[in-house]
Image (spheres, rainbow, N blue to C red):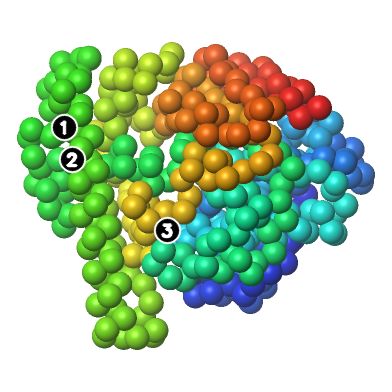
Amino acid sequence: MRELLPVPMQDQMGGDVYSGIARAAGLLWCGRERAVPGETTETVLLFCHPSSNFVGHYALSPTAALGFDAVGAVTRYAGNDTQVILENCVADLGSIIRHLREHEGYRRVVLVGNSGGGGLAAFYQSQAEKPTVLDAPGGGGTDLTRAVLPPADDLVMLNAHAGRADLLRGWLDPAVVDEQDPFRRDPELDLFADRALPLDRGWVRTYRQAQADRMDRITAWARSQLRLLAENYGDSVPDLPFHIHGTCADPRFLDTTLDPSDREPGTLWGDPQSANLRPVTLGSVSTLRSWLSQWSVADTNGHGPTCLEQVSVPVFVAYGTGDKGCFPSMAQALYDAALDPRKGILAVRGSGHYFEGPKHLLTDALQAITAWLG
């Protein structure tokens, strides 16, 4: 039976949390499934993500059925990635892991970074083992050298990518030439023009560079806006929101010979051209500070492979070969970065990002993970 697990925060929620009730309570409400009702297993699997509400995570019940308690973490940004500061998410994970050890009695904590949680889990563990980050890149973050961050015992990357900034750089639409007007487009860089498949590899290289250039332009603008805020308002207005048009235009959505797998063309949100402009994908709305923390390749501390190079615990990487959002090269980069020789990697054949398909795909993956833990 699913139960709510209230976790006290180690620091006061700031003004970046919309809900006044949440700020006043100072609690992170997580979800737990026990293997045996009323009892606590020695090992717990903690599933994490920067902003997704994992109280109802699909893997909690199947994990409990395999004999391990499972907890779905929730950060202060649950359901809203507009203001995510990854450094604050790390502090929230520290609160949860401390609570699981000191108050719930778990002796072994396995941190499972699912999807965007992969980079977060790697960032957390690197700071738990050797804290170096004093603040978020644009301010508003937790000093992680002073936070309570109990290290996890093992890391699992589940259908994870290298990090939110790395992912968005591959998804940004470089045909957008005016950040205020999504309909002004460069036809030479328009992925959704009538192009033959497979895509010309020279054109793809040009496209990738244009994506990186657009990200750099947005980052430079965000930094300049933060400077203007400080000059005009001091600390009274620390941040501003803005909109990013065209956030779902990765050539791999159309051409499955790029980063080949057995996935079908398309995105997690359906047709790529539609998803590209709708406000349902990642990074469509951000704040200046959040952009620098989670979306800017030049600034983020949450690049998974870089963080894993600083981690000493074993790492297991599991990915679905039918995943339309996280591709095999991303899983391989995470695996290659892990240093502990006990690391492992598993390709779940035919499985999508949410383990769409036969029910045994999820169970098989979790059995492989728990067998590796054993």
Indicate which disc residue 210 carries: 2
- Point out the tag, 1 or 3, that comes first from the N-terminus: 1
Q: How far from the left and from the top, in percent, is residue 253?
A: 32, 26
Residue 357: tell me if it is visible. no
- The residue lying toward the viewer, choosing from 208 and 324, is 208
Q: Amino acid at mark 3?
A: Ser
Q: CA distance from mark 3 to mark 2?
A: 22 Å
SS under mark 3: helix
**What residue is shown with label 3?**
293
Rendered image quadrant of residue 82: bottom left
Q: Residue at x 59, y 26 (%)?
A: 318
Q: Are marks 2 and 1 in contact (CB under 8 Å)?
A: yes
Query: Residue 356 vs residue 225: left or right?
Result: right
- Residues at badges 3 and 2 in contact (C-beta under 8 Å)? no
Q: Three-letter amino acid code at disc 1?
A: Thr
Residue marked by disc 1: 206
Helix, strand or loop under label 1: helix
Question: The N terminus appears in which quarter of the rendering?
Answer: top right
Near-viewer residue (105 or 133): 133
Amino acid beneath label 2: Ala
Q: Which residue is nearer to you in this view: 73 or 2? A: 73
Quadrant where the C terminus sits is top right
**Dot 2, crowdedness within 10 Å: few (<14), some or many (≥20)?**
some
